[in-house]
Amino acid sequence: MLGEYPIAGRRAAEIAASVERAVGAGELPPGQLLPPLRELAHRLGVNPNTVAAAYRVLRERGVIETAGRRGSRVRSRPSSTPREWIGVDAAGARDLSSGNPDPALLPPLGAPLAAAAARAAERPTLYGAPDVVPEVAELARAALDADGVPPGPVAVTSGSLDAIERVLAAHLRPGDAVAVEDPGWGSLLDLIPALGLRAVPVGVDDDGPLPERVEHALAQGARALVVTDRAQNPTGAAVSPTRAHELRGVLAGHPDVLLIEDDHGHGIVDVPLRPLAGGTDHWALVRSTAKAYGPDLRLAVLTGDAVTLDRVRGRQRLGPGWVSHLLQDAVAWLWRTDAVDPAAVAASYDTRRAALVRALRERGIAAHGRSGMNVWVPVPDETGAVARLLAAGWAVAPGARFRVASPPGVRLTVSPLAAEEIGAAADAVAAAAGATVSGRLA
């Protein structure tokens, strides 16, 4: 019987590694029931506690899930399978699936990198230097103050996801629940089980997370809430003044909840920031440079309460130590010289996004895209819609990348679209998806 299960090992770490290798190789497919603890222990000749420890490690890594007497199974989509792999081959098609910014709107990096290199030649960064370049902290804090973000120290991380991971790890432990937007950012939905945490889906509309869903998630024990303030991926939602007031009210009743705000849309949207921070003991707000200045900069700034930032920076010092001062100096140069005109960038995305949403609605297709570079289209048959669009020469992102329990849909990124292509894109979506009835997000 054990031959049915490619599992081996004498120690918990070896058994867990064996299962993880088998999952990665496809030998243990999604949904596969694993042997009961005592059966596997007997066949491997080890103590049942050893197998229990191995299964616990696998649960914490997001590889398997356990449902009491029904046993342990390989997760339907293990954390070793990134959601980015759920996609289509866009070869030969107009690719609206990537989620990338428009390269034409990104600033050239030659001058800022040259300036950073010149500074490094004069004053090399050595061990013991501050983890945050003072000018970066000063400029970032000034921009945060202007947007009404509560006071707090500043850290620099290697992108938004790195910051969110560090904040979650600073406060949560495996098994804790995290309330997340649904539909929401696929990379975050991957990260949570990879950390051994549980994602609790919270529905969203065009104004952000639904307060009653947030209240329910927190009342059920979620220890953290992650909110995208604007340019939400994939729906384009942006927290409105009314919604911000309602969400602050919910959070006031749960001061022990960790609040994480993702403001990756900073610099590419014209919707004002409505920060939620201030009503909980621990909070963090993250701003990435990826969308406005280029994904390859791999830099985000993070602020929050003093305890959270102290834990994040302390743990960072034990790992990578700091984000390269070359990159920090280059970003400071971009900020200081106003290398990007946020209003012009926002207008470019807004014009294309609004035109696509309008064209879709004129064709009877419910579409969402209040801010940012993405448009979300609810569809009755996600797989069929993606396939029909691909056959028509358009590649879009399957909603499965972004969903936990919300209805199916597809995401279109407007970055590659020219004005003259919008009508054709809307025609293709209408033909592939058909008119939706409610167009609801959750």
Image (cartoon, grey):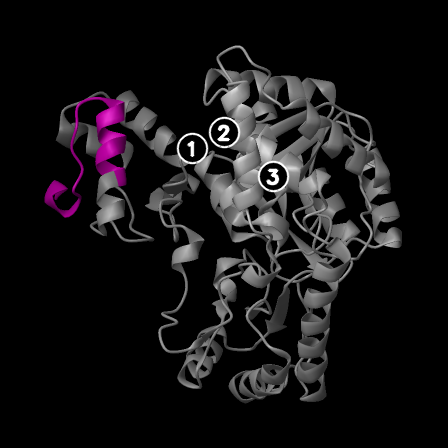
Of the numbered discs 3 and 1, the one sitting upstream in the chain is: 1
- The residue located at (65%, 47%) in the rendering is 264
**Above or below for 394 versus 147:** below
Q: Which residue is mark 2?
A: 174
Looking at the rendered image, the quarter that the N terminus falls into is top left
Prevailing secondary structure class for the magenta stretch in the rendered image? helix
Give the farthest residue toward the top.
128
Q: Taking 33 as reference, is 329 left or right?
A: right
Region rendered in magenta: 1-20
Q: Is residue 2 magenta?
A: yes
Find numbered disc 3 in the image and state the secondary structure of the residue it sits on. Answer: strand
Q: Can residue 44 be spotted in the picture?
A: yes
Residue 193, how many percent across, how many down? 47, 40
Q: Which residue is mark 1?
A: 60
Looking at the rendered image, the quarter that the C terminus falls into is bottom right
Q: Taking 254 as reference, is 37 left or right?
A: left
Give how far apart the Cα atoms at labels 3 and 1 are. 14 Å
Q: Nearer the viewer, residue 249 or 41?
A: 249
- The residue located at (88%, 46%) in the rendering is 245
Residue 97, how many percent across, how many down? 49, 67
Q: Which mark is residue 178?
A: 3
Asked if the residues shown at circle 3 and circle 1 are in contact, with their CB atoms under 8 angstroms apart, the answer is: no
Asked if the residues shown at circle 2 and circle 1 are in contact, with their CB atoms under 8 angstroms apart, the answer is: yes
Residue 55, how many percent across, how many down? 33, 32
Of the numbered discs 2 and 1, the one sitting upstream in the chain is: 1
The amino acid marked with disc number 3 is: Val
Give how far apart the Cα atoms at labels 2 and 1 are. 6 Å
The amino acid marked with disc number 1 is: Glu
Q: Quadrant of residue 362?
A: bottom right
Residue 433, how many percent across, how many down? 55, 83
**Above or below for 102 versus 166:** below
